[in-house]
Image: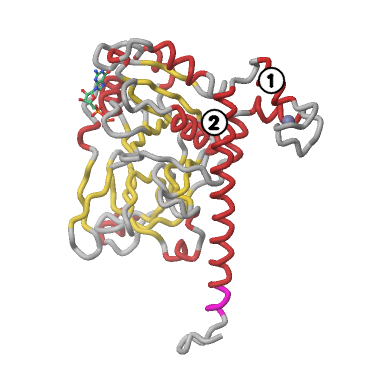
Amino acid sequence: MNNIIIENGTKGEEKLGRISTVGKNSYGILFMGEEIPARLKGRFYEEDSEAFPVVGDYVKFMYNSRGDSLILSVCERKSFLQRPDQAKTGVMQYMAANVDYLFIVTSLNEDYNYNRIARYASIAIQGGAAPVVILTKSDLCTNVGRYLREVGQISDKVRVHAISARYGIGLDELKEYMTPGTTICLMGSSGVGKSTLINSLTGEDIMKTSAVREDDDKGRHTTTYRKLIELSNGITVIDTPGMREVGMANVQDGIDETFSDIVELESRCRFSNCRHDTEPGCAVKAALESGELSAKRYELYKSLGRENTNNHAMKKEISRWAKAYKKRWQYADPKTKRV
Ligand code: GDP
Ligand code: ZN
């Protein structure tokens, strides 16, 4: 009976699916191996942007076989990756949900950037996903060990592997992450070998068809990215194209966890407001002098923390303005806009 109603297109049936693409006002839901177009139920637009679906979200929706299905609600997130937007306005960009492993992919030639890796790792830890750094193109590098050691020192929560997809080196190490039901999010600049890696891990030539076209509401063609792909081996891959720089607002918790040993040291200073400068009884300075804490790592911790503080302050400022603005128009006369 229900089926007949669906075929008529008059009434849908509530289903559970997973968000695979996010366009401007349109979504794609992966449902029973197919991507179906969808849009949001109106009440979403009264909520904070955090409540909007992101790639990887499980959603309840009203299935419509003849047009857009209607997204009713977002299921509770197991993990949630977010970062400040590129313009550094302090506004957060929500990237992906329900990610088990964040594969931080960087190639062992000109792309390698220690600070960027640490930032991605902080985002993963903060968001509840496990950071796995994958150093690609090891065949082009003569001192792989040095990079492995350096990344390994970021935090004991960060796993690191060096691979060469071209020569099949190191791929076995990644098998442990490839269990059915796992969601892997890939991050890294274009050209570092993400597609090659996924293709060689899965034996499928899956990553080439990552761009799909869809109609936007004005009938023009726009390109959105098929960001979530379910592989036949039960792994789900989320690709985040073109992400180069990652800012740090609101990820102090992630930083503190990544650098938990330094936070621990700071708590051992004699004075609770120690600036680790000239104060007596400073545990941080002692550790730096004894070599227990590397100066480079401490510098990184400080610089990431500083950047974060700035963005956080800016974010507060923006939200204050936004609130004041909203309040003002709330009481305003709709015609004259006068309070
Ligand atoms: P993506 O943009 O991150 O998906 O990168 P691709 O997977 O498309 O790879 C970019 C280029 O790097 C291609 O020309 C690949 O053949 C090359 N490449 C990928 N993996 C390796 C590797 O392990 N060694 C070498 N030497 N080249 C690689
Ligand atoms: Zn101190």
The answer to whether residue 85 is above or below residue 217 is: above
Point 31% across, 40% down: residue:
242
Res. 181 in view? no
Point 64% across, 15% down: residue:
291
Q: Which residue lies furthest to the left in this view?
A: 220
Q: Give the color scheme: rainbow, by chain, secondary structure or one colour.
A: secondary structure
Looking at the image, tell me whether mark 1 or mark 2 is earlier in sequence order. Answer: 1
Q: Main secondary structure of the magenta part?
A: helix
Residue 87: give x, y in percent of width and height.
41, 52
Residue 160 tag number: none
- Residues 153 and 230: in front is 153
The answer to whether residue 126 is above or below residue 293 is: below
Point 51% across, 39% down: residue:
79
Task: Determine the secondary structure under disc 1.
Answer: helix
Picture quarter with the C terminus: bottom right
* 1 and 2 marks in contact (CB < 8 Å): no
Residue 186: give x, y in percent of width and height.
37, 32
Give the residues in magenta.
Answer: 326-330
Q: What residue type is labelled 2?
A: Leu
Q: Name the residue under label 2.
A: 300
Res. 107 in view? yes
- Residues 333 and 86: in front is 86
Picture quarter with the N terminus: bottom left
Quadrant of the rendered image containing residue 188: top left
Q: Name the residue under label 1.
A: 287
Q: Which residue lies furthest to the front in this view?
A: 278
Q: Residue 259 colored magenta?
A: no
